[in-house]
Amino acid sequence: MAQQMTKEETAPQLNGLDTVALFGTLAAIEQTPALADFEFRASNQWISGGENRSRIKEFFGVGAEDESRNSAFEFTNGEPPVLLGNNEGANPVEFLLHALAGCVTTTTVLHATARGIQIESLSTKLVGTMDLKGLLALDDSAPIGYKEIRIEMDIKADCSDAELDDLLAFAQDHSPVCNTVCRPVPVTIERIK
Amino acid sequence: MAQQMTKEETAPQLNGLDTVALFGTLAAIEQTPALADFEFRASNQWISGGENRSRIKEFFGVGAEDESRNSAFEFTNGEPPVLLGNNEGANPVEFLLHALAGCVTTTTVLHATARGIQIESLSTKLVGTMDLKGLLALDDSAPIGYKEIRIEMDIKADCSDAELDDLLAFAQDHSPVCNTVCRPVPVTIERIK
């Protein structure tokens, strides 16, 4: 990071990412792998029925508690009338699609940037199918949660189709939310007594 | 649903849920299982760097396209400075915690209501651990995505501790987002050409 920069390198942006910071982060983690240990957090308060609200602010990463956020992000889960709510917010399985869309997109942009690929545009449409007999405990053979999630991606970039396909496969393999969904990740619930 | 209601049953709410509608939904799905087939959707547009925005409105369920929402919900993913962003929004892995918190909470409230348990208060704190060497492709042995997610739940209800523990275990087993995380769910990405 102490490298001398030429004039051309003073604002090295690609796809809206600071490439000096990106390669600096990669080098720092290679030297001190523990910097890559992150802990993300959320707290949530039930309001009524299918309505509840999360607060997200602090996290740990790069060896320290993050102090960059002056205020918390707040998000409200709700349910539509057919699921006994009043559309107080999107519902949790919809928020999961938002998380997945964002993660696949950001991972694609990150690795495109590392490869020197300039992205012109990128949008996704997601569809997730679910059998609610699982949630409602009406059929033990019904899968609980999403059966599958399909992502349709429209991406334009200054590279070949083969390079794009390779980039997308790599991004899918390395997206944290995509892997949290497609791999089994242990969840534990502990009740405060 | 055509049952005659007595005066006491005209506003049958428990935990903010309409219990007549709840048991009516269960009966309707038992009679016509295909009503439980849902399709949830999101579309997402990349903005720059780690910033992108989702739009969530339409879904299919109970045998029809839902028409209850006049406008779309919109959510912005961002990244903090240590992850090369400007806190344009919470980041995707944090949104996943919000989805998980909301789903475990709503599933708990739903099955408490079905059991006649009145919940006084319910809040959760979530912590998810992650090794970013996975995302950054710096170490092939690093797990990609969350290593584990721990939920601490503070719940007060008009039942015994044993009944609460049974309710929580049942809710964890039947929460769609919790199962999408702890089970492997297939994700496919198709590029529009």
Image: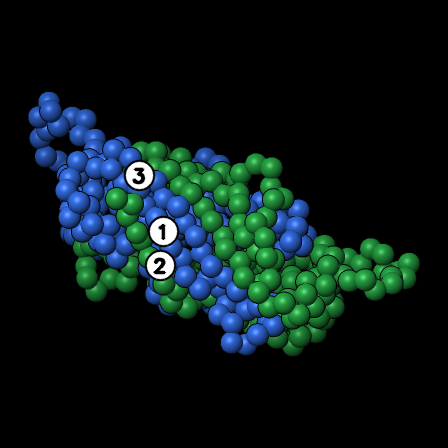
Chain colours: A green, B blue
Above or below, A33 against A146 in this view is below
Q: Which mark sits nearer the N-terminus, 3 or 1?
A: 3
Q: Which subunit holds the residue at mark 3?
A: B
x and y percentages locating residue A112 in the rendered image? 67, 66
On the question of residue A9 being in view, the answer is yes
For the residues labelled 3 and 1, the Cα–Cα distance comes to: 12 Å
Q: Which subunit holds the residue at mark 2?
A: A
Instruction: Find out whether the residues at labels 3 and 1 contact each other: C-beta distance under 8 Å.
Output: no
**Which residue does the numbered mark 2 point to in the structure image?**
A187
Answer with the quarter of the image where residue A90 lies. top left
Q: Residue at left 80%, top 59%?
A: A12
Q: Residues within 10 Å of mark 3 (few under 14, many from 20)?
A: some
- The amino acid at mark 3 is Leu
Q: Residue at left 57%, top 74%?
A: B139
On the question of residue A95 being in view, the answer is no
Answer with the quarter of the image where residue A124 lies. bottom right
- The amino acid at mark 2 is Val
Looking at the image, the residue that sits furthest to the right is: A7
Above or below, B105 against A114 in this view is above
Asked if residue A49 lies left or right of residue A3, the reply is: left
Residue B122, numbered label: 3
- The amino acid at mark 1 is Ile
x and y percentages locating residue B56 in the rendered image? 48, 46
What SS does tag 2 mark? Answer: strand
What SS does tag 3 mark? Answer: strand
Q: Which subunit holds the residue at mark 1?
A: B
**Which residue does the numbered mark 1 point to in the structure image?**
B151
